[in-house]
Image (tube, grey):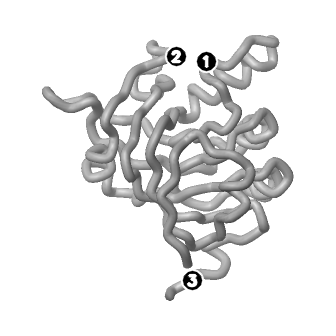
Amino acid sequence: MATYHLRAPLDDATVEKLRSGDIVFLSGRVYTARDAAHKRLVEALDRGEAPPFDLRGALIYYVGPSPAPPGFPIGAAGPTTSYRMDAYAPRLYALGLKASIGKGRRNEAVKAALARYKGVYLGATGGAGALLARRITEARVIAYEDLGPEAIRELTVRDFPTLVINDCHGGELYATPRID
């Protein structure tokens, strides 16, 4: 098990060195999107429209944050269950997405997309939304504001803690837990 401090956006070479069980601290730009935002995003792509952010090298965090308390950029920001985005994820990886962040297992189509397009699935700790929010230094809505917490946001994160669940080599932490 290795520990990495990575800066988003990511590239193929960076993703290829990651293995399930590795610890990754992310800094840089991460986008948020949940079920409703994914549906709209893919519908827009189907109409030939450009996505609201550059998918190449991007990371999407499956989160619907709570309102920001005074003096903070965001409220509690814990991960949501990832399988609800599985129908959309392969298409986004094909367009350059490099990582998704959430909790829970992914389906076989997502795992195949990770291998084919050199992507990774990162887990964030469920139930720790208030603590994870401390790693978010900026947050702004960039699309679908009417969706409230499910709007697409651009976050700036600093040392955001994640764990590699599925790597691009077929490794899956849930299938073969590593305890070093």
Does 84 sit left or right of 154 as displayed?
A: right
The residue tagged 2 is 143
Whether residue 49 is situated above or below residue 172 in the rendered picture: above
Separation (CA) of disc 1 from disc 2: 6 Å
Q: How many marks?
A: 3
- Find numbered disc 1 in the image and state the secondary structure of the residue it sits on: loop
Amino acid carrying mark 3 in the image: Arg
Q: Residue at x 63, y 50 (%)?
A: 83
Mark closest to the chain's N terminus, 3 or 2: 2
The residue tagged 1 is 52
Amino acid carrying mark 2 in the image: Ala
Q: Are marks 1 and 2 in contact (CB under 8 Å)?
A: yes
Separation (CA) of disc 3 from disc 2: 38 Å
Q: Which residue of the protein is positioned furthest toward the right in this rendering?
A: 116
Whether residue 151 is situated above or below residue 87 in the rendered picture: above
Picture coordinates of residue 143 (x, y %)?
A: 52, 16
Whether residue 143 is situated above or below residue 5 in the rendered picture: above
Mark linked to residue 178: 3
